[in-house]
Image (cartoon, rainbow, N blue to C red):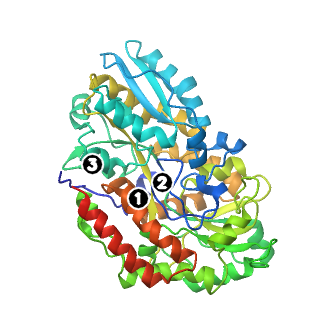
Amino acid sequence: MARQFDTVRLTRRGVIRMLGLGSLGVVGGSLLAACGGGAPASSPTTAPAQQAAAPTATSATAQQAAAPTPTTAAQSQAAPAAQGNAPSGKKGEVSWLVRTGTVENKWEKDVAIPQFEKANPSIKINLIVSPWEQFDPKLFTLFAAGTPVDVWAHWGRSGFADFVHKGMVADQTPLIQADNYDLSGFAPGLVDIYKQNGKYLGMPLLTTFGTPMFYNRDLFQKAGIDLPPVDWSDPWPWDKFVEAGKKLTKDYGTPTGSYGISYTTNIQQLAYLGGGDAFLPEHYQTGLAHTTKLDSDEVLAGVQAVYDLMYTAKVMPTPQLSSSMSSGNVDPFRAQKLGINIDGGWQYWNYKPQIHNFKWAVGADPTLKTNKNVTYTDAWLISSKSADPQSAWAFVKYLVGEDGQAAYISATGTPPTRTKLIDKWLSDFTDPTGMTKDQLSKVTSGALQQGVESVNHLFVGYEEISKAIDQVMGDVWAGKTTPKEGLAQAKKQVDVVLASIK
């Protein structure tokens, strides 16, 4: 099914104006769960205990209470089956499929549902809670059985584009028009991410403020390193970034070693780093393409730069070293074994409750050719087969409205998509980061201005695309093959996958 997205890029001056923002685990490469799930495919630079790091870096310990998406791959295998009644398919009942997560589930049960049902006594919400690994099977099984869920997000392996491609997603535009629903309260660009052919197919529930540079402020001060800029238009050049990593790295490769840098191995961002793109324009426009540019010089430049952090500059741990750094389910950044972590913006809401023994802060990404970065925006979707789309829409309106979103961000710490709530979110992060609101405003708005929505949300079949990339690139990050050889092989494998997607 041909699909035309009106926009996926968040490089809008309006974001800055509207938001008023003008003034590890060691990261893995897979995007299978980024923002939406809790467990990526095995990543070459992620130790087993940190598999939860993409997208939330929340381990199986007490940190589960801190993050909206705490389920790891190992937890999913041991997790209970999806909980809740099957959808009734009756008028006045809305089935809501969500992911397993201590904080989110408490908010759903104790806040969201009671608040909504009190204001809408004629509508009953049927909550269905599913572990990450079971999320998509549960969703697809219910659809196939003729009892589809009414409201959900891309919180399993599949993304928005997959659901649209399968005809599962309702057009919310008639509902918006019938209500004269005002979309201007959202940050500019966010509601357009899930708009195609002039139709709104999803309402944004959270965004991540990109993939910024998280760093240990205390370690920087001890090493005498100037703090990185918060202005994305005037970032560190790559050589200064590497030099900082060298000053922060101690006893490389030893049991007591600590490391200066971890940089995401997300191929989308590495392509931008090198000044290019791994994918074609039509991929962004329709979700479908038949080839990639994985073997281009620009993608190679980005991959080579991060590869060299491991094997030439020796400031970033190799996959083997990452595994040895894991202990007690505490990722290296929180354990102060890592000075810089360039990772998804989910770390804002992970680090805030998890880190108490040092000040962490956020800077603009360094630039090799560009510092364009990946942002992740989740949306609530309504089933095209819903028996009561009006009730489902009423519930979505609550979830993305000011009251519902205020309760959600208070519970989880995730950045809001409502502009009126941005100031409160910024205030909540001044103390843990030691940054002023103006500094946080600048770094978050710059990330959005330089941001492109994650392709795992926007490409049909991204699970298989990602597996094909990870299968080859794992050997690259492990030092078993060169970046050039790995990317050439990755292109061949991904092109085979793309040819099979109809």
Which residue reaches farthest top?
Answer: 122
The quadrant where residue 380 appears: top left
Mark found first going from the N terminus, 2 or 1: 2
Above or below 380: residue 498: below
* Amino acid bearing label 2: Ala
Please tell me which residue lies in front, 103 or 39.
39
The quadrant where residue 93 appears: top left
Q: Residue at x 77, y 59 (%)?
A: 358
* Amino acid bearing label 1: Ser
The alpha-carbon separation of the residues under discs 3 and 2 comes to: 20 Å
Q: Nearer the viewer, mark 3 or mark 1?
A: 1
* Residue with the mark numbered 3: 195
Please tell me which residue lies in front, 268 or 485.
485
Above or below 284: residue 237: below
Task: Report if residue 363 is visible in the image.
Answer: yes
Q: Residue at x 60, y 47 (%)?
A: 74
Determine which of the numbered discs, if any, sits on residue 454 in the image. 1
* Residue with the mark numbered 2: 34
Q: Position of residue 167 (x, y in %)?
A: 23, 41
Please tell me which residue lies in front, 105 or 142.
142
Image quadrant for the C terminus?
bottom left
The alpha-carbon separation of the residues under discs 2 and 1 comes to: 8 Å
Secondary structure at badge 3 equals: strand
Q: Mark 2 near mark 1, Cβ–Cβ under 8 Å?
A: yes
Q: Position of residue 126 (x, y in %)?
A: 44, 21
Secondary structure at badge 2 equals: loop
